[in-house]
Amino acid sequence: MSSLIYIFLVVVLVPHVVLAREIMRSEEIIFDQNYKVTWGDNHVISINQRKEIQLTMDYSSGSGFASKLTYGSGLFHMRIKVPGRDSAGVVTAYYLMSQGDSHDELDFEFLGNREGKPYALQTNVWANGEGDREQKIHLWFDPTTDFHDYKILWNPHQIVFYVDNIPIRVYKDNSNIGVGYPSKAMQVQASLWNGENWATDGGKAKINWTNAPFKANFQGFDVSGCQSQTLIDPNCASNNYWWNEQKFWQLDPAGQRQYENVKQNYVTYDYCKDRHRFPTPPLECLY
């Protein structure tokens, strides 16, 4: 019996312990160690000795920051609190993106809404310049009242989007059957910007500028990633990096149950099921 308990702890709990451990480590890392402001400098505020950054947006500008380095695989996370009140048209984004043509990109996009209506959290996967893989969920909490942790696990086998350690989306490597899979070195980025042309009610709900400045706060500036100096770095697929180990090639049983619950109860849009846009389902949707 004791051996069975040990196996359960190793197989089911260890991956979650590792993910949680990464958050705890991040609390001592200040912004400037791994990140830099990239635009809207006068709309970026440092808090708590640069352990927290606030991006702001008014009618004149939004703002953003990015990692100083690019990465070819890893576990990327940020603690985020998004703008409250009437935030329709306002987009808070946390994402990975490569440079150049035919880019790769992995997105968290928080789509604001009228006061009293829920935020939509949209994820998207771009590979070789092709996206249109949007999924949306309504969160089981109010993301405007406190910080929550948002993660992207990216290795040669799968991409997993997490909210507070709960998997909300899984995108598998099916490149062997012709499905695009991100493989280019990417920069970690975050931004607060004007998306009123599309973000809320298909662009019908415009930004109420009387509520400006809008504010999004970010914490957790460590990066667990394979630093890459080239566009494609084979070394970043090595199992020497813990996030590439076999236990991260698929969800563990507990994670799979959590993921199924999210799909059944919180997903509000899935491109795989949109027959108006895709009369023939994209190939990756069949697996």
Image (cartoon, rainbow, N blue to C red):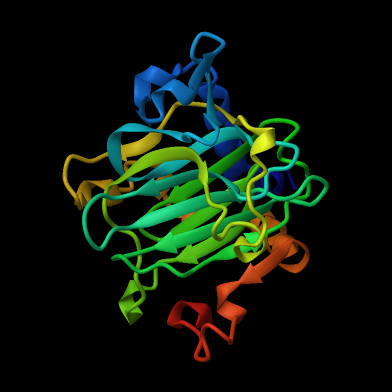
Q: Name which residue lies at 72% across and 36% down.
A: 84
Quick check: 164 above or below 231? above
Quick check: 248 above or below 211? below
Near-viewer residue (277 or 71)? 277
Residue 244, percent across and down?
A: 39, 49
Direction left: furthest residue = 230
Direction right: furthest residue = 116
Locate residue 84 relative to residue 203 in the image: left or right: right
Q: Name which residue lies at 16% across and 45% down.
A: 230
Q: Name which residue lies at 67% across and 31% down.
A: 147
Near-viewer residue (240 or 283)? 283
Locate residue 132 relative to residue 227 in the image: left or right: right
Direction top: furthest residue = 49
Residue 217, percent across and down?
A: 59, 28
Near-viewer residue (265 or 46)? 46
* Observer able to see residue 104: yes
* Observer able to see residue 14: no
Q: Number of callouts in the render? A: 0
Residue 78, percent across and down?
A: 53, 34
Residue 72, percent across and down?
A: 29, 47
Q: Name which residue lies at 54% across and 62% down.
A: 170
Q: Picture quarter containing residue 123? A: bottom right
Locate residue 246 relative to residue 178 in the image: left or right: right
Quick check: 235 above or below 133? above
Q: Picture quarter containing residue 128? A: bottom left
